[in-house]
Amino acid sequence: GESVGLHLPTLSVQEGDNSIINCAYSNSASDYFIWYKQESGKGPQFIIDIRSNMDKRQGQRVTVLLNKTVKHLSLQIAATQPGDSAVYFCAETSYGNNRLAFGKGNQVVVIP
Amino acid sequence: NAGVTQTPKFRVLKTGQSMTLLCAQDMNHEYMYWYRQDPGMGLRLIHYSVGEGTTAKGEVPDGYNVSRLKKQNFLLGLESAAPSQTSVYFCASRPGSKTQYFGPGTRLLVL
């Protein structure tokens, strides 16, 4: 199986419940944030993004919340499904920066 | 649209051998990136390119070289592989916006 999840914070959630994954970012100049999902044996997949002029953005079953005051980002997954089992990464960047800074990731395990 | 593809999917090398990992994208993206991913360490940037003919160092460039001779291809070379380069390598590309799109990865084992 995929070894990227070793030693990562793990969230175990019952199927059908809501999941909340948290991310603290370090750079107060960051103005663009992305959540990625990485399933076992696959590359990271874009889920949703948010700019710093927003506090909340919703997608299909996912919501990202941004609190710039405390430099905190969260991803909420509604009605979690077995296919949501994966490692979730947040990433941040700023205007003029060609690079993304990635968090170490959070493992989500969905219990059927 | 195949998106971002990587070749090979898996490779075993002996210490001191060389190899080239190929990344190709068919989305006409300007920017391309090479990362390595190790257990518990997240994604670390090796090298990147902001356009055809350009390359720049990332966070962990030592032991690797890259070339971007064509816009759609970004090559990552290991001249003399070491066991510390055992990892999963991901390529990504992006257009002018910030979101990067990743390939499926290349698993490299150096013995």
Image (tube, coloured by chain):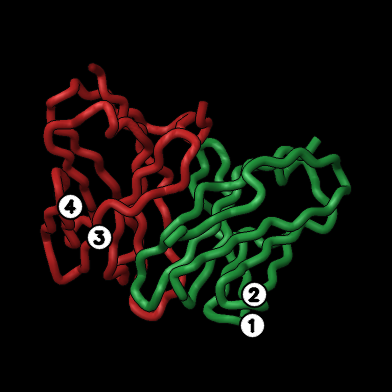
Dots 4, 3 in contact, CB < 8 A? yes
Image quadrant in which the N terminus of chain B is located: bottom left
Colour representing chain A:
red
Mark 3: amino acid: Asp
Please tell me which residue is depicted at 35% across the width and 44% down the height of the picture. Answer: A37
Left or right, A89 with reference to B10: left
Q: Mark 3 = which residue? A: A49
Left or right, A35 with reference to A1: left
Image coords of residue B11 (percent x, y): 72, 41
Mark 1: amino acid: Gly
Image coords of residue B110 (percent x, y): 77, 39
Badge 4 and badge 2 both on one subunit: no
Quadrant in which residue A86 is drawn: top left
Mark 2: amino acid: Arg
Q: Mark 1 = which residue? A: B53
Q: Mark 4 = which residue? A: A64
Q: Is residue A38 above or below residue A14?
A: below
Secondary element type, mark 1: loop
Q: Residues within 10 Å of mark 4 (few under 14, many from 20)?
A: many
